[in-house]
Image (tube, grey):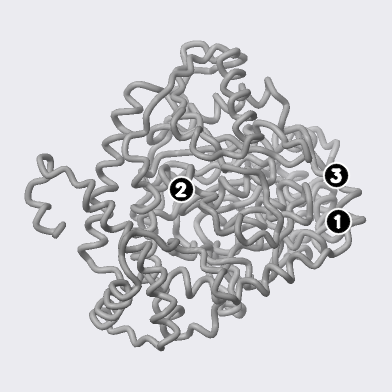
């Protein structure tokens, strides 16, 4: 009963082989036994869950299941508002924040019968580091990171503490932890799921997302939370999963694009080998895999960074400029450069973003989906700050920029037993296709049937890595934003920072100036790269805004 799929649990409940109380209690006991090591939860609601299970049992006896997720134990990433239960967004600055309403996704899952066991830990404000409520450990190896920012959600699902968890994805925040923990992470099309009640960072990049143990579970949870919402004007009333081929046991007729140039750009050898084997397996299942070029991919990281920084810094200005001592050092360092960006900078990035969308539209006219790594390497050691600072999300940001769906799932393991994830990306509203392709691959490979060693978790003893990691975060090497780069001199960067800070009405201490001058070189380089990419022949009146 500890490692059931949602469909299996629903059948056991239907036949009364298992009761809602037994199902919830099993998972509550796992949390009590394992979360002391994992730290997957900021807040647990086990007493409330047990009461809800009793009510669900009474409802079942009287009228049968109250929804497709009747009594299914879930967790909510701690950026989802929950009525009467604190929502911290992983930050001590919000430690006492208790909403008086539920996020729409929370409402929909409850309406489908799901029972929440608590709020999952995450990177601070979903954009910093784990400086708020401690480090979440990876169930496959507690010395390693669970990924971010949906760390707690992924660890909770991977360890069987819950059967599904809400997550989010602004630049890979569901697909990175899914890859690191061997779970299924789905970032739907922008507008598929309501964002009402989520702590916002980036208005145009934030996506609600889901984490489950298998593809079929992801499909069931997605169906439960897909609905138009008058409280979120970005949602679209669209359900079209039935359009896609069934693909029962094979993938004949499917055309998959494999961006070979990207795959030769510095993958860990074990990840590269696992992805090559996955492509071969997809071909063996009947798919046609063809090499493709993702035009404009070299601008994805810089474009995403400028948009994310501009929107995030605007949203968080009061915290990062006015009350910097109440948030972790990483959040402040990462977001402060965003206050130096101008409207022209933002418009330039949005212009390049539109060109990327056009490029992907042309590409998806030739293939049904793309096959990509979910991450360039497997889970790193918790205190490996160099790995944490590296561009672990470089294959994830494209789908956030275009708003197209992407799904991460296991495609192998390292020699040391760590999960390796691959990613399927499709055109807008093609979640149905991605889920069906992933389900065929999952059944053929059985990677998702492996589970972490629970005995090793219960016997694990603290190795001090988390404390080392947290100490490192307070030092200057912990900046996780744009790296230094470009030809700008230190003096030119400092002058740029002074001028931009004055224009933004931002008072800088001398230490801030030195720190921002280093980061500004990367930002100035990013803006120069985007400006150089503008196609003058294809640009009309917008050119006036790009000077």
In the rendered image, the vertical position of residue 367 relative to residue 190, given as above or below: above
Number of the label disc, if any, that sits on residue 29: 1
Image point (76%, 65%), residue name = 465
User: What x and y, as percent, mark residue 308?
Assistant: 39, 60
Is 486 or 234 nearer to us in this picture?
Answer: 486
User: What x and y, as percent, mark residue 274?
Assistant: 64, 29
User: What x and y, as percent, mark residue 69?
Assistant: 66, 43
CA separation, marks 1 and 2?
Answer: 31 Å
Specify the quadrant that holds the N terminus.
Answer: top right
Is 233 or 331 nearer to us in this picture?
Answer: 331
User: What x and y, as percent, mark residue 406?
Assistant: 49, 38
The residue tagged 2 is 193
**Mark 3 vs 1, N-terminal side:** 1
Is 72 or 178 nearer to us in this picture?
Answer: 178
Is 23 or 195 nearer to us in this picture?
Answer: 195
Specify the quadrant that holds the C terminus.
Answer: bottom left
Asked whether residue 162 is in view, the answer is: yes
Q: Quadrant of residue 230?
A: bottom left
Badge 2 marks a residue whose secondary structure is loop
CA separation, marks 3 and 1?
Answer: 17 Å
Question: Alpha-carbon neighbours of circle 1 within 10 Å: few (<14), some, or many (≥20)?
Answer: few
Number of the label disc, if any, that sits on residue 453: 3
**Mark 1 vs 2, N-terminal side:** 1
Which one is in front in this view, the residue at disc 3 or the one at disc 1? 3
Asked whether residue 220 is in view, the answer is: no
Along the horizontal axis of the image, is 72 left or right of 499? right
In the rendered image, the vertical position of residue 168 relative to residue 374, given as above or below: below
């Amino acid at each position: 009963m500890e490692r059931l799929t949602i469909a299996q649990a629903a059948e056991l409940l239907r036949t009364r082989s298992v009761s809602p109380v037994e199902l919830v209690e099993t998972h509550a006991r796992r949390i009590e036994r394992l979360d002391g090591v994992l730290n997957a939860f900021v807040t647990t609601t086990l007493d409330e869950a047990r009461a809800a299970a009793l009510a669900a049992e009474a409802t079942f006896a009287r009228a049968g299941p109250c929804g497709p997720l009747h009594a299914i134990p879930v967790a909510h990433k701690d950026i989802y508002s929950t009525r009467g239960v604190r929502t911290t967004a992983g930050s001590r600055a919000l430690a006492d924040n208790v909403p008086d309403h539920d996020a729409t996704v929370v409402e929909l899952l409850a309406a489908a019968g799901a029972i929440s066991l608590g709020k999952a830990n995450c990177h601070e404000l979903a954009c910093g580091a784990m400086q708020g409520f401690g480090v979440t450990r990876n169930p496959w190896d507690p010395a390693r990171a669970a990924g971010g920012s949906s760390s707690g959600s992924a660890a909770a699902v991977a360890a069987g503490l819950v059967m599904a968890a809400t997550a989010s994805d602004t630049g890979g925040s569901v697909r990175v932890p899914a890859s690191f923990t061997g779970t299924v992470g789905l970032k739907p099309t922008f507008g598929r799921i309501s964002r009402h009640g989520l702590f916002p960072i980036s208005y145009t990049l934030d996506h609600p997302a889901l984490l489950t143990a298998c593809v079929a579970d992801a499909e069931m949870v997605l169906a439960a939370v897909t609905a138009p919402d008058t409280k979120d004007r970005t949602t679209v009333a669209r359900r079209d999963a039935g359009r896609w081929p069934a693909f029962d046991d094979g993938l004949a007729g499917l055309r998959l694009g494999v961006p070979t140039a990207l795959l030769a750009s510095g993958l860990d050898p074990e990840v590269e080998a696992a992805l090559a084997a996955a492509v071969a397996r997809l071909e063996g299942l009947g798919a046609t895999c063809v090499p493709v070029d993702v035009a404009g991919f070299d601008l994805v990281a810089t474009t995403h960074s400028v948009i994310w920084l501009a929107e995030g810094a605007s949203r968080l200005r009061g915290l990062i400029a006015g009350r910097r001592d109440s948030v972790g050092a990483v959040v402040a360092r990462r977001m402060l450069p965003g206050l130096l960006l101008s409207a022209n900078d933002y418009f330039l990035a949005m212009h390049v973003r539109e060109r990327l969308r056009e490029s992907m539209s042309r590409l998806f006219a030739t293939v049904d989906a793309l096959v990509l790594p979910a991450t360039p390497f497997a889970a790193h050691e918790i205190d490996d700050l160099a790995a944490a600072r590296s561009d672990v999300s470089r294959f994830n940001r494209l789908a956030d920029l275009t708003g197209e769906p992407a799904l991460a799932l296991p495609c192998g393991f390292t020699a040391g037993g760590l999960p390796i994830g691959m990613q399927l990306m499709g055109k807008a509203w093609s979640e149905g296709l991605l889920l069906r392709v992933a389900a065929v691959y999952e059944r053929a490979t059985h990677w998702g049937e492996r589970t972490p060693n629970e005995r090793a978790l219960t016997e694990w003893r603290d190795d001090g890595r988390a404390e080392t990691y947290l100490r490192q975060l307070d030092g200057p090497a912990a900046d996780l934003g744009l790296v230094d780069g470009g030809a700008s001199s230190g003096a030119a960067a400092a002058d740029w920072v002074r001028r931009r800070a004055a224009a933004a009405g931002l008072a800088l201490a001398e230490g801030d100036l030195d720190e921002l001058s280093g980061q500004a070189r990367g930002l100035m380089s990013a803006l120069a790269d985007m400006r150089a990419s503008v196609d003058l022949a294809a640009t009309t009146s917008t050119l006036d805004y790009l000077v």
